[in-house]
Amino acid sequence: MKKSVTTDGQPASGLIDNKIAELGDWRGDTLSLMRKLIREADPDVVEEWKWMGTPVWSHDGIICTGESYKAIVKLTFAKGASLKDPARLFNSSLDGNVRRAIDIHQGEQVDPDAFKTLIRAAVEFNQSGAKAKPRRAK
């Protein structure tokens, strides 16, 4: 994994560690697991800390963000509408032109292999240099 630092010089990975620890409940466990799967899918992923406290994973462009809310952990794929999702992991932001998201509620599991496949597809899309094509969900 490549290291990224914030504008104030702090390592982004440390800020993400702190965020996971601060959540201290199922949301922290879920975000930690999804982070682990992202790193397994792409060992060259760059962790970033943007928009006043949002974990971001990038490789030649943003792959996804990891947001935590009271009832969900949301993984928003920046160019998700351009990705094939045969396992139908995307379950949120389906009407958007570019982004797609996976909302994970307490007690829900995401298929690890399907998720890693989606991460790899996002990296490949970023590396292809293709522009995200606006597409409505079917």
Image: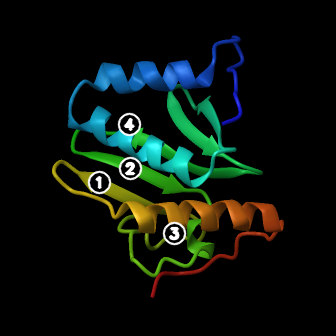
Do the CB atoms of the residues marked 4 and 1 lie less than 8 Å apart?
no
Q: For residue 111, say whether it is visible.
A: yes
- Is the residue 4 above or below the residue 79 in the image? above
Mark 2 vs mark 3, CA separation in Å:
15 Å
For the point 67% across and 20% down, the residue is 6
CB under 8 Å between callouts 1 and 3? no
Is the C terminus in the top left, top right, bottom left or bottom right quadrant? bottom left
Q: Nearer the viewer, mark 2 or mark 3?
A: 2
Mark 4: which secondary structure?
helix
Position in image of residue 42 (x %, y %):
62, 51
* Residue 93 can be seen, yes or no: no
Which one is in front in this view, the residue at disc 4 or the one at disc 2? 4
Separation (CA) of disc 1 from disc 2: 6 Å
Which of the marked residues, 2 or 3, is nearer the chain's N terminus? 2
Decide which of tag 3 and tag 4 comes sooner along the chain: 4
Residue placed at 44% from the left, 51% from the top? 75
Mark 4 neighbour density, 10 Å: few (under 14) some (14–19) many (20 or more): some
Q: Are marks 1 and 2 in contact (CB under 8 Å)?
A: yes
Q: Image check: 73 left or right of 54?
A: left
**Left or right, 79 with reference to 109:** right
Q: Tell which circle, 1 or 3, labels the residue nearer the N-terminal end.
A: 3
Residue at image mark 4:
32
The residue depicted at 38 percent of the width and 36 percent of the height is 32
User: Residue drawn 29% across and 36% down?
Assistant: 29
107 versus 47 height, above or below:
below
Q: Is mark 2 on a helix, strand or loop?
A: strand
| Label 3 residue SS | loop
Task: Indicate which label's residue lies in the foreground, 4 or 1.
Answer: 4
Tell me the residue that label 1 is attached to.
104
